[in-house]
Image (cartoon, grey):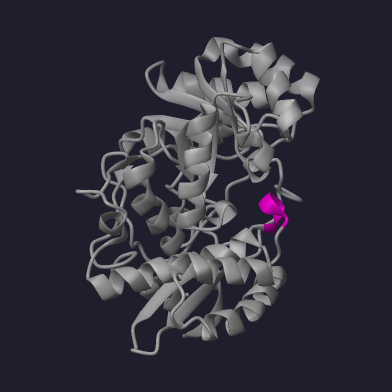
């Protein structure tokens, strides 16, 4: 089989301001994505995507491209090997989940194209999932945050996630709650920006606003465990800390957010979902500002992962790019077609 990689840069329409950004007030550079194409000897083609986000996961575009270059001979010599064996060979050459995700998605897409079936069907589901979404609100001024919240709720979104850990968190979160009323679920995401004492004190101050959960208040298994013990009445969720495999050895908080890019693709999400559930966590899915192949992959895998909370997959509209996956009533379903779905690759060609 032949592996090719193409870099695409997509401009932001509405960047998401978060505490991990180097400068949340600077105009962000276009978002790099890597489109991967795998063609088999019989001419069948599968597409995948790598979506590194250096401010979030520390992985650069160059690191992904270097890893994909090392994967080329593995894929070229993969005749007769299974999906799992190809992934294992690539991981041995360079263990970088964000690059492995592209290979995994392309192999799943290829299998779906050959079978004439969507991936959710290959995974054993009898029907496509319809996934409830949350909408993320960045570290904006209170009035702007409230306006964004009202816009999301008007489109049927019933769960909002507000970025905290930078600026006036209390004013921002209170403005959002006042705008949307008590019925909309409200979660926070600090992206690990707080120190332990800061996290506990801030969350105690915000508890009266009726929070669904707080995602990644601090970084690391020890810190998240400590926050969860200090605030037993509030669900604490691990996000970035999910890259640490020790998280899955025993339950230290309530929830785990799984992402296609960080987990290494559909196969990685399936693996981590089993480990998370065995440890006692509940699960939801989210995007790392993925392109449509990554979002579609998460929608397909939701058919078997069955997330119990709204998922952070409503991110494509933040890019200046054509609409390919539509939000309907605050929910999203996989696109029609075989493999990952129809019309997705054209999105990258339009950039």
Q: Nearer the viewer, residue 265 or 237?
A: 265
| Magenta-drawn segment | 54-58
> Is 152 drawn above or below residue 337 in the view shown?
above
Asked if residue 161 can be seen in this view, the reply is no
In the image: residue 190, left or right of residue 339? right
* Residue 111 visible in the snapshot: yes
Q: Position of residue 185 (x, y in %)?
A: 43, 24
Q: Where is residue 131 in the image (x, y as percent from the top left)?
A: 33, 42
- Along the line of sight, the residue nearer the viewer: 121 or 147: 121
Q: Could you tell me residue 61's position as x and y percent?
A: 67, 69
| Point 53% across, 38% down: residue | 275
Return the residue nearer the eye: 222 or 194.
222
**Would you place residue 46 above or below residue 264 in this image?**
below
* Residue 217 covered by magenta stretch: no
Residue at the location (46% across, 85% down)? 1
Residue ID at (70%, 20%): 227
Asked if residue 259 lies left or right of residue 229, the reply is: left
Residue 55 is covered by the magenta coloring = yes
Q: In this view, does 337 lie above or below 78?
A: above
């Amino acid at each position: 089989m032949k592996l090719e990689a193409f870099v695409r840069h997509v401009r932001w329409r509405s960047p998401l301001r978060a505490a991990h950004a180097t400068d949340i007030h600077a105009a962000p550079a276009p978002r790099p994505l890597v489109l991967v194409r795998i063609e088999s000897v019989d001419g069948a083609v599968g597409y995948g995507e790598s979506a590194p986000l250096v401010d979030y996961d520390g992985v650069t575009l160059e690191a992904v491209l270097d890893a994909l270059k090392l994967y080329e001979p593995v894929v070229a010599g993969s005749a007769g090997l299974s999906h799992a064996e190809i992934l294992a060979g690539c991981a041995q050459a360079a263990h970088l989940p964000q690059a492995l995700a592209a290979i995994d998605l392309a192999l799943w897409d290829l299998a779906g194209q050959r079978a004439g079936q969507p991936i959710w069907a290959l995974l054993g589901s009898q029907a496509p999932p319809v996934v409830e979404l949350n909408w993320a609100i960045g570290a904006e001024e209170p009035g702007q945050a409230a306006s964004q919240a009202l816009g999301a709720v008007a489109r049927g979104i019933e769960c909002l996630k507000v970025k905290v850990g930078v600026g006036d968190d209390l004013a921002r979160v209170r403005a959002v709650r006042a705008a949307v009323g008590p019925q909309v679920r409200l979660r926070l995401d600090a992206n690990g920006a707080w120190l332990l004492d800061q996290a506990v004190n801030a969350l105690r101050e915000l508890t009266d606003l009726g929070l669904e959960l707080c995602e990644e208040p601090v970084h690391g298994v020890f810190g998240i465990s400590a926050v969860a013990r200090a605030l037993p009445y509030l669900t604490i969720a691990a996000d970035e800390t999910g890259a640490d495999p020790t998280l899955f050895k025993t339950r230290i908080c309530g929830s785990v957010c799984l992402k296609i890019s960080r987990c290494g693709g559909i196969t990685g999400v399936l693996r981590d979902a089993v480990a998370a559930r065995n440890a006692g966590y509940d699960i939801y899915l989210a995007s790392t500002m993925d392109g449509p192949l990554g979002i579609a992959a998460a929608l397909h895998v939701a058919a078997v992962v069955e997330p119990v909370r709204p998922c952070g997959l409503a991110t494509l509209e933040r890019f200046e790019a054509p609409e390919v996956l539509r939000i309907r009533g605050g929910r999203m379903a996989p696109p029609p077609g075989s493999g990952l779905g129809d019309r997705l690759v054209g999105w990258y060609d339009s950039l």
